[in-house]
Image (spheres, helix red, strand yellow):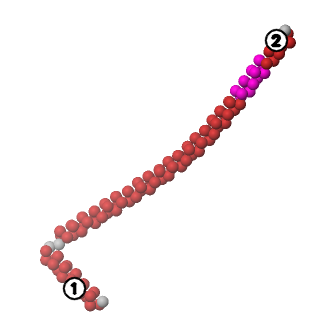
Amino acid sequence: AEKSATAARMTVATSAGNVAAAEMIRLEGEKAELARGKEEAEEAATQLKGKLEEAEADTARARKALEDAEERARAAQADAQEARAIAEGMSAETLEKAELRARAAEAQVSELE
């Protein structure tokens, strides 16, 4: 009976050992899977960071282009206002004389060609 009890205890111990070994193998697999997931997440985060930096640079370039365009528009508007003021300041007679001079200049250019 003692041999039988010892054999039974050994069987139970062996079974418990097998269960523990199987659990260790399963946990190692989960650990490896989590490590792969962590690596993938870090890689995705790095890619997103790069895309964010590109987007910020694009935004800065677009903002600069907009500021430049606004400055050119203000300059063009100032030029137009100046031209309008000059045109309004000319009398009808002065305007006619300017037109005659322009036609004469065009005629001279045509003769030279």
As drawn, the residue found furthest toward the top would be 1
* Marks 2/1: CA–CA distance: 130 Å
- Graded by Cα atoms within 10 Å as few (under 14), some (14 to 19) or many (20 or more), the crowding at tag 1 reads few
Q: Residue at x 17, y 72 (%)?
A: 90
Secondary structure that dominates the magenta span: helix
Tell me the residue that label 1 is attached to.
104
Q: Is residue 23 magenta?
A: yes
- Quadrant hosting residue 78: bottom left
Q: At which x and y percent is residue 92?
A: 13, 74
Q: Nearer the viewer, residue 45 or 63?
A: 45
- Graded by Cα atoms within 10 Å as few (under 14), some (14 to 19) or many (20 or more), the crowding at tag 2 reads few
Q: Residue at x 44, y 52 (%)?
A: 59
Q: At which x and y percent is residue 17?
A: 76, 23
Segment tinted magenta in the rendering: 12-24
Q: Is residue 84 magenta?
A: no
- Quadrant hosting residue 1: top right
- Residue 5 is marked as 2
Q: Nearer the viewer, mark 2 or mark 1?
A: 2
Q: Residue at x 38, y 59 (%)?
A: 68
- Image side of residue 20 versus residue 113, left or right: right
Q: Find numbered disc 1 in the image and state the secondary structure of the residue it sits on.
A: helix
Q: Residue at x 26, y 88 (%)?
A: 110
As drawn, the residue found furthest toward the right would be 3
Residue type at mark 1?
Answer: Ala
Residue type at mark 2?
Answer: Ala
